[in-house]
Image (cartoon, rainbow, N blue to C red):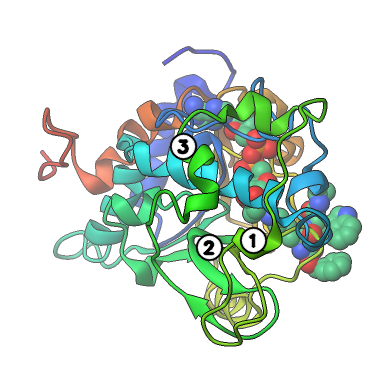
Amino acid sequence: MPPANPFYNSLPAFHARLLTARRILALCGAGLSASSGLPTFRGAGGYWRNHEATALATPEAFAADPGLVWLFYAYRRHMALGARPNAGHRALAELARKGRGRGKGQGEVDFLCLSQNVDGLHQRAGHDAERLRLLHGSLFDLKCHRCDWVERGNFDDPLCDSLRAASEDVGLERLLDPKEELAGIPREELPHCPKCKIGLQRPGVVWFGESLDAEMLREVDRWIDEDEVDVVLVIGTSAVVQPAAGYVYEAQGPGTSIVTVNLDAENVEALAELGPRDFAFAGDAAELLPKLLEPVIGRMKEDGTFGAEE
Ligand code: BV8
């Protein structure tokens, strides 16, 4: 792990803090899936590089050119299906599983993972659904853009014939390059709602300008308000998008440790408030998380599972 920041060498200090933690919240972003080969949004080669975020991820963009937006999301479905959860996803899933009862006398670790990622990798790592909130939905949920029809867990790739290009050669560069004239896909060739028959199916993600699921946000607020949160892990996110990023501060109490895990930890929003109880670890989340969480989840074994604590 590159000792790239003044807080790096406090791994033992962080482990000591972790062992006193009863309630842990994580906020995850695209950086967690980077090691699984999925592009982030703002980094080099990122999704938004040639397009403003709103150019492809808003209801208006879908209304204007549903075919282009669908090509983008069908391509991301295809890439996510070809990716595998990494050790960072698995370490968080283990924390959700093992953390529930750390052994006699140590009591429960109450862990909740908030993820901005829509790639399905947490779920494929076996993360307990009770301990996971997908703030921005999932590439693998479909819904009608007109009525209340929803289909959960659709992994068809290609989704339909007219989107076959997204599963073959279209490539991110062409999709995101506004200079590229991609052949429009006629509306009638796009998947339609099986319920109302009129509306188009759309990806089950939260677009910019759309509200997050109100019931889910109430649940998250209730969890945070239950008792002080000891540790907030801010993993692989630029902490720019709201209201997701706001949870870091909402969960922060007088005794809370904010722990930033990021390739360039120095530049993360959350660091701006870094205080004496906080930590920042610069490096790949897939490599850092198993080491950071080891006191609770045990050492990661060759086969990628997590052993009993020494
Ligand atoms: C809302 C799903 C109420 C889709 C996403 C104008 C009108 C309306 C709203 C707004 C507005 N202006 C501002 C807003 C609020 C807006 C917002 O936050 N905008 C931003 C751009 C400022 N928010 C909304 O619109 C939200 N809704 O506010 O509703 C409302 C309703 C109506 C009107 C007004 C208000 C909805 C936001 C949800 C958008 N949907 N995703 C899709 O995926 O296509 S957001 C999408 O982008 C992701 O889900 C994620 O949240 C975000 C990307 O952020 P990150 O995950 O952090 O990724 P990023 O690339 O930025 O950073 C990666 C980090 O990882 C970096 O720090 C990098 O250093 C690090 N890293 C890289 N590799 C590694 C690593 N770290 C560790 N290891 C590595 N290997």
In the rendered view, does 304 fall on the left or right side of 174?
left
Mark 1 Cα within 10 Å, few/some/many (few <14, many 20+)? some
Q: In which quarter of the image is the C terminus?
A: top left
Q: Is residue 266 above or below residue 1?
A: below
Tell me the quarter of the picture where residue 126 sits.
bottom left
Label 3 sits on residue: 33
Give the residue type at disc 2: Val
Give the residue displayed 60% in from the left and 60% down from the top: 189
Q: Is residue 81 above or below residue 211?
A: above
Question: Which of the two marks, 2 or 3, is nearer to us in this view?
Answer: 3
Give the residue displayed 47% in from the left and 12% down from the top: 2
Q: Residue 90 in the image: x percent, y percent?
A: 29, 44
Q: Regarding mark 1 in the picture, which secondary structure is present there?
A: loop
Label 1 sits on residue: 253
Inter-mark Cα distance, 3 to 1: 29 Å
Determine whether label 2 and label 3 are within 8 Å by CB: no
Give the residue displayed 23% in from the left and 47% down from the top: 297
Mark 2 Cα within 10 Å, few/some/many (few <14, many 20+)? many
Q: 49 and 90: which one is in front?
A: 49
Q: Which mark is residue 229?
A: 2
Q: Regarding mark 2 in the picture, which secondary structure is present there?
A: loop
Q: Which of the two discs, 2 and 1, labels the residue nearer the N terminus? A: 2
Q: Quadrant of the N terminus?
A: top left
Mark 3 Cα within 10 Å, few/some/many (few <14, many 20+)? many
Q: Which of the two discs, 2 and 3, labels the residue nearer the N terminus? A: 3
Give the residue type at disc 3: Ser
Inter-mark Cα distance, 2 to 1: 7 Å
